[in-house]
Image (spheres, helix red, strand yellow):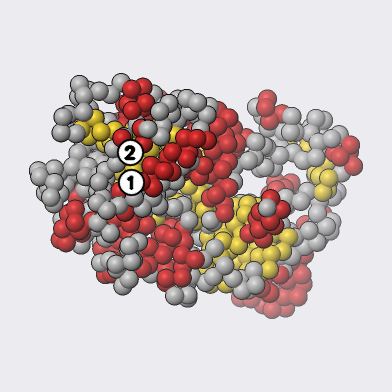
């Protein structure tokens, strides 16, 4: 019953190991891996109130430096363990109770309750590292939705309850956060981001709010003056629908302002970009260049490229833009992580990362510098790499996982490249484009079959109703080929559904990974592109839930803001950004705040096979939480988007504190 392993398991959860003089003198403060996990020894001996470490597990050489050099570090047992004999007595009692018949137990408990309680509290409960008290806790755990306080040990939640219950976890060294009645939620998990593009965007020219082609050109001209020679101007997120008339921009708008600076600024949906003459020249695009499969070069009446490139045609330019250097990538990712922490996002699912991005994540993980948890889904043409190594879905640790693949079925609504059964309105016969990965569809099927056989998870971008149908066909082929299993197949965006497909979605257990902010953005023009009937099955979140389809929420950052409050606002109000639908665009598809928060936490965790590790404020789960300035469960829905984050906690660590951030920015000023 009582053995060193039992005792050590208690100790292991204490992050505040008291160090002996010997350990301090040796200059090795603590035995921890670079990602802050305590190193659990292979062998130890228990002597009175101390653990003597006899042997550490084999470690990689780069971790070696962090371990105590003598391998004999002593850790004092905590004060809670008064002496071995008391512990032994308690354990013998526990053993006796387990063996006794029920009535004996009851009798014993009644008779011995003060003694028993004393032992329980004194012996089995180490002090919390962090206590959040006086909060309005919305746990997203159906077994206990509401609470006042939370206790955290190491990186895990150990207790959720009333202020009084949690106070029992308070120790001398517990950090205490008084939430002053504010709302505490599980950290948000964004199921679809382009994290590095998002980080780049934070520093690049911002064209999203340019209200005319002239302003668009002026902003690019200003940026060109600040841009070193030969460096590209990228990013942008322009949106021509805000212009009158809403014409796609042409290179002549910016050529005279950027005579020697290559420019490739993308439309906010990422499916179109505008290149200036310098960039077209570098990319080798002329009137003679043929449209690639799954893309098009926009041309004027004479057949000359206008500079606008759609979908696969953008690759001509992307190929000649120099990749980020390692240092640039580290900087961009750190910028993105700081932004994520400031808006309460504790997990992101990075769709289509470069391998270089994953290398930087791995480096930051080893340095203990990741402040967001990452699930990375490289592009499906790279299937062989993950299949060869033999990783399966959600392979990795709490901070970094791989094992998924991002695939593309079609383009986007705004660019006229989403693939529909019927043509777009006022665009001739245009029904959109299947992506180059789907030319032919059997190419995609072969890759998916291979991925499924390897146990990799599929996350497929499909927006038009026909594209979604084809992907559901392919997904059902997987079931036919390899039988029923827990695949958690996903369709990213799942924007414009054919009525017949909701049931199929549910039957195949496909997760709808959706971005409500797109609804209030595209809602401005969707009906003009596809008509009322198809629009009624667009961003049909309520219909998905009614059919028993699981939702995972995200933003598609950099396409939409990463801030979850904008997404919650969008899902709950469906009030389009142009202010024309204050009561909601297709209001029957609105979600409630609790439904939205659940899909954004548990839903997204499920979509990455992590619902047992995170997604709710539940004892045993990772301590990822966010404290908000306002109670979004009770304030007027239109105020949700003005809500800010007070604190973000990741694995028990405070990674964002609004008060500290305010002081810092005041100092900078
Ligand atoms: Zn995306």
Question: Which of 95/178 is in front?
Answer: 178
Residue on which the image places disc 2: 253
- Residue in the picture at 48% in, 47% down: 348
User: Which residue is outermost to the left?
Assistant: 429
Classed neighbour count for the residue bearing mark 2: other residues with Cα under 10 Å, few (<14), some (14–19), many (≥20)? some
Q: Quadrant of residue 382?
A: top left
User: Relative to 562, is 399 above or below?
Assistant: above
- Residue in the picture at 69% in, 78% down: 110
- Residue in the picture at 50% in, 26% down: 229
Q: Which mark is residue 3?
A: none
Mark nearer the N terminus (1 vs 2): 1
Q: Does the residue labelled 2 lie within 8 Å of ligand 1?
A: no
Label 1 sits on a secondary structure element that is helix
Label 2 sits on a secondary structure element that is helix
Q: Residue 631: x and y, percent?
A: 52, 72
Is residue 445 shown to the viewer in this render? no
Q: Residue 650: x and y, percent?
A: 60, 52
The residues bearing labels 1 and 2 have C-alpha atoms spaced at a distance of: 7 Å
**Left or right of 611: which side holds 532?**
left
Is residue 83 shown to the viewer in this render? yes
- Residue in the picture at 81% in, 36% down: 28
Residue on which the image places disc 1: 213
- The answer to the question of whether label 1 and label 2 lie on touching residues, with beta carbons closer than 8 A, is yes
**Left or right of 23: which side holds 538?**
left
Q: Quadrant of residue 181?
A: bottom right
């Amino acid at each position: 019953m009582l053995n060193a392993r039992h005792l050590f398991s208690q100790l292991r959860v204490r992050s505040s190991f008291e160090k002996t003089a010997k350990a301090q003198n040796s200059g090795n403060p603590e035995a921890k891996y670079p990602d802050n996990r305590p190193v659990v020894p292979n062998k130890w001996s228990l002597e009175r109130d101390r653990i003597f470490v006899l042997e550490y597990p084999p470690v990689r050489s780069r971790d070696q430096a962090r371990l105590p050099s003598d391998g004999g570090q002593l850790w004092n047992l905590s004060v809670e363990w008064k002496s071995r004999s008391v512990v032994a007595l308690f354990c013998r009692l526990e053993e006796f109770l387990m063996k006794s018949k029920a009535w004996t137990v009851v009798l014993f408990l009644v008779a011995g309750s003060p003694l028993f309680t004393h032992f329980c509290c004194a012996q089995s409960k180490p002090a919390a590292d962090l206590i959040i008290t006086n909060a309005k806790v919305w746990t997203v755990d159906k077994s206990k939705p509401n609470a006042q306080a939370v206790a955290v040990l190491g990186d895990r939640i150990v207790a959720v309850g009333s202020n009084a219950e949690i106070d029992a976890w308070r120790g001398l060294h517990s950090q205490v956060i008084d939430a002053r009645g504010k709302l505490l939620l599980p950290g948000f998990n964004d199921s679809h981001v382009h994290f590095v593009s998002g980080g780049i965007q934070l520093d690049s020219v911002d064209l999203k709010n340019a209200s005319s082609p002239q302003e668009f050109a002026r902003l690019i001209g200003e940026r060109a003056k600040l841009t070193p020679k030969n460096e590209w101007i990228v990013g942008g997120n322009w949106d021509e629908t805000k212009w009158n008339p809403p014409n796609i921009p042409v290179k002549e708008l910016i050529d005279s302002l950027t005579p020697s600076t290559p420019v490739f600024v993308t439309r906010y949906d990422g499916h179109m970009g505008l290149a200036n003459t310098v960039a077209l020249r570098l990319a080798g695009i002329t009137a003679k260049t043929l449209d690639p499969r799954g893309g098009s070069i926009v041309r004027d009446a004479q057949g000359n490229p206008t500079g606008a490139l759609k979908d696969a045609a953008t690759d001509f330019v992307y190929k000649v833009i120099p990749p980020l250097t390692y240092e640039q990538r580290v900087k961009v990712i750190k910028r993105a992580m700081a932004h994520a922490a400031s808006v309460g996002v504790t997990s992101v699912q990075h769709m289509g990362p470069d391998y270089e991005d994953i290398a930087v994540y791995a480096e930051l993980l080893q340095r203990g510098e990741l402040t967001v948890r990452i699930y990375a889904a490289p592009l499906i043409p790279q299937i062989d790499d993950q299949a060869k190594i033999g990783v399966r879905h959600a392979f990795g640790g709490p901070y970094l996982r791989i094992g998924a693949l991002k695939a593309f079925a079609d383009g986007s609504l705004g660019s006229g490249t989403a693939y529909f059964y019927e043509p777009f309105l006022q665009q001739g016969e245009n029904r959109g484009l299947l992506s180059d990965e789907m030319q032919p569809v059997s190419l995609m099927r072969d890759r998916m079959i291979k991925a499924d056989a390897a146990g990799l998870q599929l996350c497929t971008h499909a927006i038009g109703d026909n594209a979604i149908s084809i992907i559901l066909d392919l997904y059902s082929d997987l079931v036919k080929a390899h039988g029923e299993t827990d695949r958690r197949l996903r369709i990213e965006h799942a924007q414009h559904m054919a009525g017949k497909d909701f049931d199929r979605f549910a039957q195949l257990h496909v997760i709808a990974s959706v971005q409500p902010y797109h609804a209030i953005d595209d809602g401005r023009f969707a009906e003009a592109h596809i008509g009322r009937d198809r629009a009624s099955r667009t961003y049909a979140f309520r219909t998905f839930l009614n059919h028993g389809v699981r939702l995972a929420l995200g933003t598609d950052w950099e396409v939409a803001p990463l801030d979850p409050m904008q997404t919650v606002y969008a899902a709950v109000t469906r009030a389009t950004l142009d202010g024309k639908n204050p009561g909601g665009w297709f209001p029957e598809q609105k979600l409630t705040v609790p439904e939205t928060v659940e899909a954004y936490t548990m839903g997204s965790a499920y979509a990455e096979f992590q619902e047992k590790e995170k997604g709710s404020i539940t004892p045993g789960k990772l301590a990822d939480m966010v404290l908000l300035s306002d109670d979004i469960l009770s304030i007027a829905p239109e105020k949700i988007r003005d809500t800010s984050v007070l604190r973000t906690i990741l694995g028990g660590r405070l990674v964002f504190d609004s008060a500290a951030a305010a002081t810092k920015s005041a100092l900078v000023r």
